[in-house]
C-alpha cells in the first residue's frame, strides 16, 4: 500500500477533501472517526473518561457529551494530557490494525490525522495539506458550525500554525474558493499521488501517532 497523510487546520475543509479523495479511489483511515468509535457507551475508553471526569460528560441519551469534555480539557495541559493518555493508545492500536490489514494490497491509503504535523509522519509516502486563510476558517466555523468567534480563534491558535503545516506539505490543496475550485485542486493532488513509487508489499507497518488533542469538542476539521 501507499500511505498518504492528510491534514489541515480546523475549518479548512479537510473532511470534504478526504471524501473527494475517496471518490477518486483512495481508502480513508480517519483518526477522528476511530476516536468516536472507541468512545461509544460500553467501550473501555468511555468508561475511563467517565471515571476521570464524572457523569457531567455524559449526555442525556447516555452518549459522550463531546462539548462537555472540550470544556474540561481545552486550555488545561494536565487535563489534555489525561485525555491523551486514555484515548491515544487505543486509537493508535486500532489505526495500526487497520493499516496492517491493507499492508499487502495496492491500495492508496489516506491517513486523515488532524495533528499529523505536530506528532510526526515518518514512513508516509507524502503529505497533503488542506489550506485556507485563518480568517476564512473563522467565518466558516461561525457560520456553519455554531462556534462563537473567539472560540473559533482560540481553537485555531492552539493548533500548529499555518506556516508550520505548509512547510511540511508535499502538496497543498487550496480550499479558499468554490467546490468546483476544490475539485480541481483535489484532481491535481490525486495526479501527484499517482506519480509516487509504491513501497514493497512486505514492508512492515510502523505505528503512526494519532493524538487527539486538537479541538476535542469538534468532530471534524
Image (cartoon, rainbow, N blue to C red):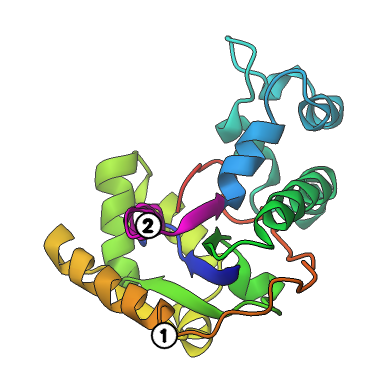
State the residue in front, 117 or 204: 204
Q: Quadrant of residue 188?
A: bottom left
**Residue 42 location (% of width, % of height):** 77, 18
Per the image, label 2 sits on a secondary structure element best described as: loop
Q: In the rendering, at what x and y percent does residue 179 appear?
A: 17, 59
Could one spot residue 99 in this view of the protein?
Answer: yes
Separation of marks 2 and 1 at Cα, in angstroms: 29 Å
Horizontally, residue 109 falls left or right of residue 55, namely left
Q: Residue furthest top?
A: 61
Which quadrant would residue 111 be assigned to in this image?
bottom right
How dense is the environment of label 1, judged by Cα within 10 Å: few (below 14), some, or many (20 and up)?
A: few
Q: Quadrant of the C terminus?
A: bottom left
Observer-nearest of 22 and 128: 22
Residue 200 in the image: above or below residue 179: below
> On the picture, is 109 further left or further right than 77?
left
Secondary structure type for disc 1: loop
| Residue annotated with mark 1 | 195
The vertical placement of 145 against 207, above or below, is: above
Q: Nearer the viewer, residue 114 or 191?
A: 191
Span highlighted in magenta in the image: 13-29
Could you tell me if residue 71 is visible in this image?
A: no
Residue occupying the point 64% across, 80% down = 199
Q: Quadrant of residue 65?
A: top right
Residue to which mark 2 is pinned: 11
Around disc 2, counting alpha carbons within 10 Å, would you say few (fewer than 14), some (14 to 19), or many (20 or more)?
Answer: many
**Which marked residue is nearer to the observer: mark 2 or mark 1?**
1
The reply to whether the magenta stretch includes residue 94 is: no
Amino acid at each position: 500500500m501507499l500511505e498518504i497523510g492528510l491534514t489541515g487546520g480546523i475549518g479548512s475543509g479537510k473532511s470534504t477533501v478526504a471524501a473527494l479523495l475517496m471518490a477518486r479511489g483512495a481508502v480513508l483511515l480517519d483518526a477522528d472517526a476511530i476516536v468516536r468509535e472507541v468512545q461509544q457507551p460500553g467501550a473501555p475508553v468511555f468508561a475511563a473518561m467517565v471515571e476521570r471526569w464524572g457523569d457531567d460528560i455524559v449526555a442525556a441519551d447516555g452518549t459522550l457529551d463531546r462539548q462537555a469534555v472540550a470544556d474540561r480539557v481545552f486550555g488545561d495541559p494536565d487535563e489534555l494530557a489525561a485525555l491523551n493518555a486514555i484515548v491515544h493508545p487505543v486509537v493508535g492500536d486500532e489505526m495500526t490494525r487497520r493499516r496492517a490489514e491493507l499492508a499487502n494490497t495496492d491500495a492508496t491509503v489516506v491517513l486523515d490525522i488532524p495533528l499529523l504535523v505536530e506528532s510526526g509522519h515518518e514512513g508516509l509516502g507524502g503529505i497533503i495539506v488542506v489550506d485556507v486563510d485563518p480568517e476564512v476558517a473563522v467565518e466558516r466555523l461561525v457560520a456553519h458550525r455554531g462556534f462563537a468567534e473567539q472560540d473559533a480563534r482560540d481553537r485555531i491558535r492552539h493548533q500548529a500554525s499555518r506556516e508550520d503545516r505548509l512547510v511540511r506539505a508535499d502538496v497543498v490543496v487550496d480550499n479558499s474558493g468554490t467546490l468546483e475550485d476544490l475539485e480541481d485542486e483535489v484532481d491535481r493532488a490525486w495526479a501527484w499521488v499517482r506519480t509516487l513509487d509504491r513501497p514493497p508489499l512486505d514492508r512492515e507497518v510502523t505505528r503512526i501517532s494519532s493524538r487527539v488533542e486538537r479541538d476535542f469538542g469538534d468532530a471534524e476539521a
